[in-house]
Amino acid sequence: MNNEVYQLGELEELILMIVAILQDQAYGVRVMDEIESQTGRKVNISGVHTTLDRLEKKNLLSSEMGGANAERGGRRKRIFSITAQGGKALQFVHDTRNQLYNQIPKAIFSFG
Amino acid sequence: MSDHKSIPKWALSFLRFYCKNDLLEQIEGDLFELYDREPDPKKARRIFTWNVIRFCRWRYIKGLEDFKLYRLAMIKNYLKIAFRTLIRQKSYAGINIVGLAIGLASCLLITMYIVNEYSYDRSIKNVDRIYRVANGVSGRWTPMPLASTLTNEYPQIEASTRIRGLYESLIKYGDKKLVQKGGAWADSSVFQVFEAEFLEGSPAHALSAPDYIVLTQSLAKKLFPDQSAMNERIEVDGVNFQVSAIVKDPVKPTHFPYTFIGASLLDESYGYNWTGNNFWTYAKVRSGVTKDEIDHYLRAVYEKYVGPAVIAYTGHDSFEELSAEYPDRKFAFTAIPIEKIHLHYSHMSMDQPGSYRNVVIFTIIALFILLIACINYVNMATARSSLRSKEVGIRKAMGSVKSILIWQFLVESLVITFLAVLIAVVIAATSISFFNQLTGRAFSIADLFSMPSILAVFGLLLTVGLLAGTYPAYVISSFSPVRALRGQLGKPGKSSLRSGLMAFQFAISIFLVAVTLIIFRQVKYMQQQDLGISIDEVLVLQNGMELGDNYDVFRNQLKQLPEVTEVGKASQLPFHGLPDYTYRYGDKQSISPYNTFMSPEMFDVLGLELESGRLFQNNRAMDTASVVINEAMAKSLGFDDPIGQKVSRGDGLDFTIIGVIKDFNFTSLRRNIEPLIIRYGAPTMEIGAYHQSFIAIRLNTSDIQSSMDRIDKYWSKHVADYPLDATFLSDSFQRHFDSELKFGKVFTTFSVLAIFIAFLGLFSLTTFVLQRKHKEIAVRKVLGSTVSSILRMILKEFAVLVLIGGVIGGSAAFYWLNDWLNDYSYRIAVSWYLLIIPILLIMILTMIVVVLKSYKVAVSNPALALKEE
């Protein structure tokens, strides 16, 4: 399955990377904050949840319920972590990008 | 620790309502966290609510997780069962479908009507900025200089125009002649107010010369089928015009459906004065200017220009004094948004007038009929529930659950409604011409399939299907399977809901019949009133001014005819709409009676009786300064002896009252006889050639047709262009009842429909009640009851319902009709027997249906019913 093709949406790819960076800290609000602080982009919390769910369904993420916490009115967090498949997907996306990026003539970047 | 009490409760409940249980905790947690860290509590609440709404997505909503393919298979099964049930119970299904279809067809037609009424003028560009300027609160006619003054002095007003119309004109082109409706005369600014799409020519030059005329595309094609009409010369009512532009036809429906607009507004013949009201004024304001602002300017304009003349009439010392006396807008101009003209100011419309009252009534009737049809469905479905109890029992025993059964019954009602909608569309399409007669509109079948109607069909399909289906579905599906299979289900025939609905149906039917009855009684009452004037043998000719000086010759010729008793001329005739003129009298007092100009012979033609004084004599020099008034006018003036008193139009135009005639009706019988002033008919400054607009002939013949032919022969000798337009005065009088008669016809139609649907329901309901009572009846017979006592027992049950319905429907009709009749000065009283008749009618019909249905059961052999067990 080496030449498996992963098709990820732009937000999906972003969130997949964030989850990988946050390791065992990745849950809805934290992911949303991280996207904003790292990229300056504002995403609605419902959008984050939807994307996390979708990635889990694609087996790129897995999740489990964390411990109760008083500051969330006693509600537990759902902690996401990246699966082996998710890692492969990130690698694939990264490789594809690099491959394309390297073919761009250097002259393009000198304008600006 | 944070406090979550200030979280919007409804938002949280809503989240908990829709969200899947296993996802709720993490979502709630995240939302709480976001809520807590927002320092501004207001903003926090807002964000919370917004997020709850944003989470409302397909994947988070519970109940949708098992929406899988097998559901589709079940729907297929529901449909199959539904059709089998319908086929098994043909008569029941038929009654239901026909009843619903009639109700739906009425709704469809009425939706089409209402959508049309509300779409008037909506297609006009910038319609929200265009106003009609009313004289006073809603007077149609405004002074000549108003439009130009508004444009010149008020920068808030973008454009303003005068319009007169719409007239029927004779158009001549070469040897072609055409009588064309929809002609208007207007200022060149008319296209700045009513923007039109120019196919040829330009708005700037369209009406820039006094002999320019703009044609609509359809009229241009009609006149010049093979060539462009541009720059051609045509003759309109004897005046030569050059076609200066061709515009697209105004989008209908509109209150201004013109076919051509000519430039010839002859200012000179009206003079630059603010006291004569001869034009309609329209104004377009700049965007952002409100109606209040415009009304403010319009009052100021009135004060500045009309004010001085008005206080000269009324004798007040200043305009402030006058307006303090009349704080409403009686002495001002008022802006009326043109979208409101059709429904709310229909006297200002140039199209078929609309009526807000009719829209409301039509809506209510449509809902009534639909309600009756829905009630039928609910009644029959619940009444029949016992028949299907075994089916429900078996289904439940086999593992079906309540929700699936509810679905099954809902699908069944949707299938019935769907079939009903199909039939309704057919009924509506076939009855469209009849509906056009009722409403005075011209709908085509294409209108029935326009977007709003299609939306209405789907809306009705869903609401009726669900509305009528939900209750029976819940009732039937909640049967306990054991009891259902044993056949023990409640007590038969004791459903209070069913009885209530039945009584309500009777109430609606009785209401509609009572209203119909009383409308026709009122019309008949008015038609039989003594008018104080004899109208039956008076023939009225229009366009009398075309005769010009030949009138006397024409009159003499007619007088030679043996059947002609007398011939007279007038500016206006009774029942043809009289204008009101303001006169000053006594000390600073003014009065605005109806006004007409008549030749001396006219009094004999109309059979008017003199009360005191004398009538006009055929001596023009003497009587042009004399007036004859009616008793009502004499009473309003309040002089001890009105003969010899003077009234004045100002500017030295004084008139002496020479005679008082007995009161007679000259408008519709809605109003009491109002003050009337009759002036001597001569071509004076005020009236010109129009003093002989109408020629009236008193005929004494049984052979009307040959008289008409003879009159026509003389007429066409003098007037080449206008064909003879003759009507009997009595017909014009009858035309005043058109709206009432139409109103009555609407109610007749819909009462018949309502009664028909209600009795369809009654018919099948009786069947089911009897089916469930057949054992009771058998036992009673065995114990010695007679057939008649059994019939009486069944009848009593329905009679009580009719009476309850009668009380409700009768009292509703009583209050509403009293209100309606208050519009009429000549009105009947709503007496009790007028309310008893409809109740009796419904009662008798009910008895007939019930007896027919129950007789068979009552006479049947009780042994047959009892041995079943």
Image: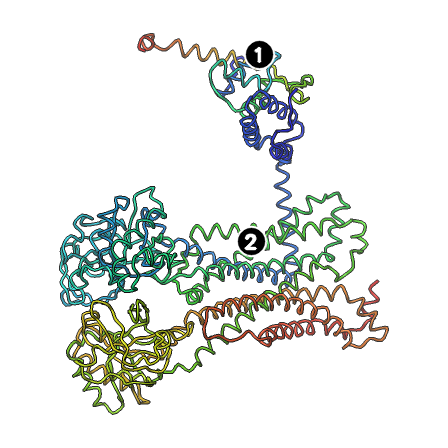
Q: Which residue is mark 2?
A: B418
Q: Amino acid at mark 2?
A: Phe
- Residue B732 visible here: no
Pointer 2 and pointer 1 on the same chain: no
Q: Residues within 10 Å of mark 2 (few under 14, many from 20)?
A: many
Residue B845 sits in quarter: bottom right
Q: Chain of mark 2?
A: B
Q: Amino acid at mark 1?
A: Leu
The picture places residue B696, in percent across and down from the top left corner, at 27, 81
Residue B103 is marked as none
The residue sitting at 14% across, 60% down in the picture is: B241
Disc 2 or disc 1, which is closer to the eye? 1
The residue sitting at 23% across, 67% down in the picture is: B650
Residue B585 sits in quarter: bottom left
The picture places residue B524, in percent across and down from the top left corner, at 47, 78
Q: Chain of mark 1?
A: A
- Residue B206 visible here: yes
Quadrant containing the C terminus of chain B in the rendered view: bottom right
Between B86 and B767, the one nearer to me in the picture: B767
